[in-house]
Image (spheres, rainbow, N blue to C red):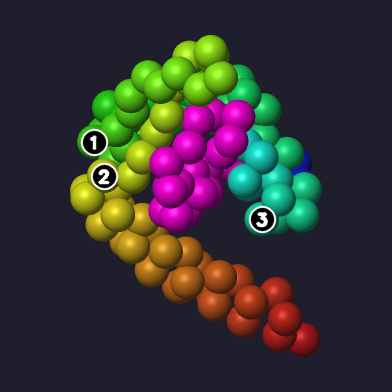
Amino acid sequence: MRREELKGHLDLILLAALEGEPAHGYGIIRAIDELTGGTFDLAEGTIYPALQRLEVAGHLASAWETVGGRRRRVYRLTTPGQRELARRRQQWGQFALAMTRLVETP
C-alpha cells in the first residue's frame, strides 16, 4: 500500500499496534507488518516522528530499557491513548461503512 494511502491513518495504526503490549520502534514496525501481511510497509523515518507526536499529545509514554546490552525506547499506550484509540476506531468504523456503501454500490 502506498504511503499516501496511509496518511491520516498512521496514528490509529500505531495506537492499535501498541494496544496489546508495549514495544520499541522496530518491534512496532514488525508487528504492523505481521498483522497486515506486509500491506503496510512503514519505514522508521515515518513512525518515529509519529510516535514522538503521540507521546507529546499524551497518548503514549516511553522509557529507555536495556535488552541484550542494547538500549531501546519502549512505548506504551496511556489511558488517554486508550480513549483516543476507541474514538478513532469509532470514526474508522463509520468511514469504512460509508466507503463500502459508496464503492460497492453499482
In 3D space, how far apart are the residues under numbered discs 3 and 1 (Cα atoms)? 25 Å
Describe residue 75's horizontal placement relative to residue 30 as left or right: left
The stretch in magenta equals: 4-28
First along the sequence among labels 2 and 3: 3
**How many other residues sit within 10 Å of disc 3, few (<14), some (14-19) or many (≥20)?**
few
Asked if the residues shown at circle 2 and circle 3 are in contact, with their CB atoms under 8 angstroms apart, the answer is no
Q: Main secondary structure of the magenta part?
A: helix
Residue type, label 3: Leu
Residue 33: % across, % down? 70, 45
Foreground of the two, 29 or 106 = 29
Q: Was residue 86 drawn as part of the magenta stretch in this picture?
A: no
> Residue visible at 29% across and 41% down?
59
Q: Nearer the viewer, mark 3 or mark 1?
A: 3
Furthest-front residue in view? Answer: 68
Describe residue 94's horizontal placement relative to residue 79 as left or right: right
Q: Which residue is mark 2?
A: 78
> Residue visible at 53% across and 29% down?
25
Identify the element where label 1 is drawn: loop
Q: Which residue is mark 1?
A: 58
